[in-house]
Amino acid sequence: MAINVFVSFNHTDQKQLEAFNSLKNKTKHVLEFHDHSCKEISPEGSERLVACQINEVRSKPIKEEIIKKFEQCSKLLVLIGVETYKDAWAEWEINNFYKMKNTLSPGNAWKMIRGMFLEGCEQGVAPKALECRSTKRLTWDPEALEKWLNEDSEL
């Protein structure tokens, strides 16, 4: 049975995401990425993407969209790179996913969240929200990812 997984990542890890895309293509599960960019119209009328900070008013629709996606996902995978520990969006996603899933399955939400070190980032630091959730970390290993994805998420 395919499950939906929300993938949280830091935008400074764009190059690493290409490698992860090849890794995710080896699984039968749906791994969904979300872009935290806001669209802005230039004076010439063209549209461009800009990074949207978590505390900006214009981040509200992005947060609402993410919450809707969380409702459809049974797991959260946090890709850990060099700068991930500084990412306010990753912190927000972890905390809100945990809160939502813990309401549905008290005491088991942490099993639905994993951090996975990006290739070459085994010394990366996880966001504080992930550290305090006592979740296990996955290495850059398709088999380890697949094993976790196959674990029963309906606890």
Image (cartoon, grey):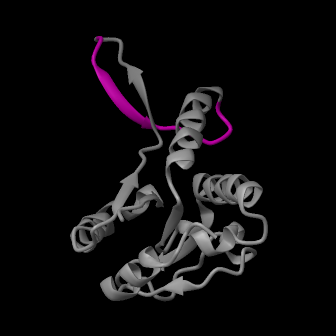
Q: Does the magenta-highlighted stretch encompass residue 40?
A: no
Q: Residue at the location (43% across, 82% down)? A: 121
User: So how many labels did they put on this image?
Assistant: 0
Q: Which percent across, then down, holds residue 114? A: 55, 74
Q: Residue at the location (68% across, 38% down)? A: 55
User: Where, quadrant-wise, is the C terminus in this rendering?
Assistant: bottom right
Q: Which percent across, then down, holds residue 57? A: 65, 27
Q: Residue at the location (53% across, 59% down)? A: 74
Viewed as shown, does residue 100 lie left or right of 75? Answer: right
Quarter assignment of residue 101: bottom right
User: Is residue 117 visible from the viewing direction of this image?
Assistant: no
Q: Does the magenta-highlighted stretch encompass residue 54?
A: yes
Quarter assignment of residue 26: bottom left
Q: Is residue 32 above or below residue 68?
A: below
98 or 4, which lies in front?
A: 4
Q: Residue at the location (55% across, 48% down)? A: 70
Q: Which percent across, then down, holds residue 79? A: 46, 69
Quarter assignment of residue 21: bottom left
Q: Is residue 77 above or below residue 47?
A: below
User: Is residue 51 visible from the viewing direction of this image?
Assistant: yes
User: Where, quadrant-wise, is the N terminus in this rendering?
Assistant: bottom left
Magenta part of the protein: which range? 45-56
152 or 54, which lies in front?
A: 152
Q: Is residue 147 above or below residue 47?
A: below
